[in-house]
Each structure stands twice: as structure tokens, then as C-alpha cells.
Amino acid sequence: MEYFTANVESQTLELAILDTLSSFSNIPFIYHFENTMAADKRDLFMPGDALRDSFYKTLLEFPLLAGHLCMGTEGRGSVVVDRNNLNLPEYCESTYDVHFDELKAANYHWGLFPKDLVSVCVVTTAGADGVIKLANIHCARLRDNSGMLLFANMSHYVVDGIGFCAFISRWAEHCRQACCDGVKPVVEHRVFHFDRNIVHKALSLDRRPTSAAASDLFFVPRFAASALAWISPALRGRIMSVVASMGKPEAHMFHISKERLEALRCSLSDYVPSDIRLSDNDLIASLASMTIVNGIKSAAISSCNGGILSRLMSVCSSIFGDLFAKTENEHLTFVIADIRHRLGICDSGYTGNCVIPQLVVNSLQRMESPITPESHAHVASRVRAAVQDLDGPYISQFVDTLNRFPSSFAQPLVYTINHPEKVFITNQSRFPLYDLNFGFGTPVWVSPIPHSAINFVKVMPVHPSQTGYNIHMTTTTGAMSNILCNPSWLDLATLIF
């Protein structure tokens, strides 16, 4: 730490509208490392000093993670790094009486995790001191030094998934050099960019109107959204964490093989135009969305968990009129899309937020109906069309309009409160999660934290020894009980735990 505090420079980073658009969430992962070293060297596995020193060395390349979040009105803000008043990341080390073999035998089930392994929830909230930490690390050494659980989290206020992976990979690179005997490997010089003007300069000169759904959701002013945008990030986090916990979330991990995906693609071919090639993500996003909506309908949540939410919405509606009004006949799936390649900045080293939610609109009746090849093909085709619609002129118009209505980042938060059937899909399958090597081998398993936001689906990469995708799905307990016996979903996805 002394190396970092002695060398860091005070600086201020102005955040952009794309940062606040994702700001309510965290980016947490848990890496499982197994100690496979020879018996006489097992004590050398992932030494704490090397991990800690290399972490702070990496932090010097990502100084904004030690800054204070300073938000102004309507969500505009900055990160202030003051070398005399640093907001250092949470960095914890501990030892647990759990052997790695026990985790492996339980298929890495979350139930064996130490209670305090994960120090954050999916929503960005302040710690006990009232301050939002922009990064959290917990190195949990397992019994007999048999392995390590590495919990890492970063706030979406400052990085997206690409930025997260850039930091973690760089940390591993520095540690690998420090732990190498003999000739040290060279740590390649890299430049990581945080300047939000990189996105602004990459925007297209052309503009194209945003979709009707996006215009209505983001750009029609609503008092409740403006109120959420004006309050402090800490208070907003407390409110959202309470709302998120009201639905009694339940999460499971599934595996989808490439073979089953190809079989599914073939089964839909009669209902898809010949000039359209459905991607793996189109197939998974559409089926997962339909499965969740079917599960919600079957669970009849209005009479159980939904009763609390329904009463809350009734009170809100009586206060705010139609600000929480629900469009009964439409369903929205939020497909989170990385826009770097669409803006031509993939190789720029940009680590800030560069994702936007693309909205897929379907009739609620279709989404709630029994899943057939024809209905699935229809929804998958709409996912494909929505994703293809994300070109430079569309993105530029979307960002321009967000900047004109800076409180618009809070609009989806209001929407989700009164739309229990909404679904979020994020594809993280290209994140290099299994490439991480601190000098002692790559992780054998990587997962998110046990619960995400309700109706949130993460498409995860698999270990290199496998093919396909791992799927992390969170919804309400009632809906999940129906999903676990839904033949349309289970024909494609195998339950891991």
C-alpha cells in the first residue's frame, strides 16, 4: 500500500452519462483457484504478500478506484482522487476451515461459501462508514492451503465488465512476475484510458431516431425518476437494495452445450426467414426471457411474494398518479450491449462504461403463452432485429438524448419496480475470466455472487475444458420453482446447482 500512497497523484475524472446509466449495479465475481503444487511447495501457493503488493501496484494504473464518488444534481458527477484523502478499495484476507476438495465435491455450490466472503450485494451501496467503495477484494485461503477463493467487485460507476477484466488481468500479470523464480517475465507496457471523451469523439456524425420504446422509457420525464436521480448515490443504493430484496430472489446455474444450441437452432429454422442467422445469444436471451415470464405467470405472485409489491405499487400509484403506470400489453427485455466495436474503439484501452440497454418489445400475451418453436422463433428474431439496430447513428442519438435528460438514467429503475415480468440479459461469455493466472494456474470455476437482480440472466463463459455457456439466472422463488420443471428450458439447459 505504501508504494501506491507514495506515488499516486491527485486527479479528478468527470463521469459521463453512460456511467450513471449503469451506476446502480456492481460487477462481482468469485474465482476458485486450486493448489496443485507439489507437496514440498504447497506453502508457496498464491502468497499473500505478493497478491497484496501487486494489487496496489496495479491500483496505481487504475487510480480512480481509490477515489471518492462525488455526484451533483440529476446524476452528473465525478471521481475525485485526493492523495491526502484516499478512498482505498476494501482489501481483506482471511483463512477458512473449508477444503478445496469439499468445494469441488459440491460442484462449487454457493452453500459452502464462508458467510462473509462476499461483502457487497448486486446494488452499489455504501459501507458501514457511509462511503461507497469503488472496489472490493477478499482473498480467502482454504484449509491446508488447498486453494483460494478470490472475491472481486468493482462499482459500475467507474468501469464496465471490460474495465473490470482489464484491472484483474493486470493484477495477475504483476503478481505472476513477482512470484516467478529466476528470470522475471517482462510486464508489457500498456496504457489504460479513463477519459470519457474517448466515447464522445467516437460518436457518429450521423443521427438516427431512437426506438419508440427507448424514447418512452428514457426520455418521457417522470417525477419519481427525477427524484431518484437527485438523491445521493448512497441513499439511492439503500432504496434499490430494499426493493431488490422484496422479491425473495433465488438463483441457479445452468449449462447449455453447443450441441443443444445447434439442435435448437435447427428446430426453429422453419419459422425464421432464410436471410436471418440467429446467434447463440439470440436463442438464449429469447428462451430465457420467455421461460422467466412463464414462470412468473405460473407462480401467481400477486397472491404471494407479489402481494407486498402490489400493495406498494398501489400506494405509489395513489401518490404519483400514472408515473408508475404499467403498460399491460407489452413486455420489455433489456439486452445489455457492449458498443465498443460499433464505435470502433475496441483497441483503445478504454475502461469506462461503454454499454447500453437495447430494448426488445414483445406482447406480454406472447411471452406468457406456452413456448413453441414458432413463438420462440418470433421472439428470437425480434432480439436479433433489436441488436442489429444498434449502429453508430442510433447510438449517437441515444447518447445525445441521454445528455439532454441527465436524470433519464433513473427511468429504468422506476420502470422495473412496477414491471415484475421485465427481464435483463447480459452476455459475459467473452470475458477472459478463465485466463486469470497469478502464477499458480488458472481458476477451475468462476461464478457471480449467489444472487443478482430479480429476472437478471448472465450468459457466462465455461472452463476451457468445456464448450457452450454457463447461465446464471435469478428470479423470484415462486417463478424459479416453475422454471426448474419447465421442459422447454430444461431441454436446452442442464442444472448445475
Image (cartoon, rainbow, N blue to C red):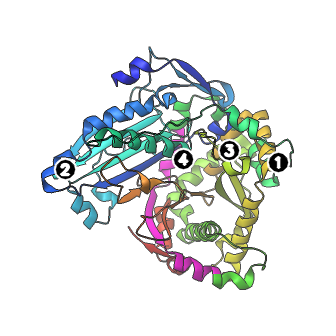
Cα–Cα gap, marks 4 and 1 = 24 Å
Q: Check if residue 243 falls in the magenta segment.
A: yes
| In front: label 3 or label 2 | 3
Distance of mark 2 from mark 4, alpha carbons?
Answer: 30 Å
Q: CA distance from mark 3 to mark 2?
A: 42 Å
Q: Is the residue marked by circle 2 packed among few (<14), some (14-19), or many (20+) residues within 10 Å?
A: some
Type of amino acid under label 3: Ile
Which of the pair 255/439 is nearer the observer?
439
User: What residue is shown with label 4?
Assistant: 161
Q: Amino acid at mark 1?
A: Pro
- Of pointers 4 and 1, the one earlier in the residue sequence: 4
Mark 1 lies on residue: 393
> Which amino acid is tagged 2?
Asn
Residue on which disc 2 sits: 145
Classed neighbour count for the residue bearing mark 3: other residues with Cα under 10 Å, few (<14), some (14–19), many (≥20): some
Q: Earlier in the sequence, mark 2 or mark 1?
A: 2
Gap in angstroms between the C-alphas marked 1 and 3: 15 Å
Q: Are marks 2 and 1 in contact (CB under 8 Å)?
A: no
* Residue where numbered disc 3 is placed: 345
Q: Earlier in the sequence, mark 2 or mark 4?
A: 2
Residue range in magenta is 239-265
Q: Is residue 183 above or below residue 366?
A: above
Q: Residues within 10 Å of mark 4 (few under 14, many from 20)?
A: many
- The amino acid type found where label 4 is placed reads Gly
Q: Residue at x 44, y 60 (%)?
A: 250
Residue 85 spot, x, y in % from top left: 44, 16
- Closer to the eye: label 4 or 3: 3
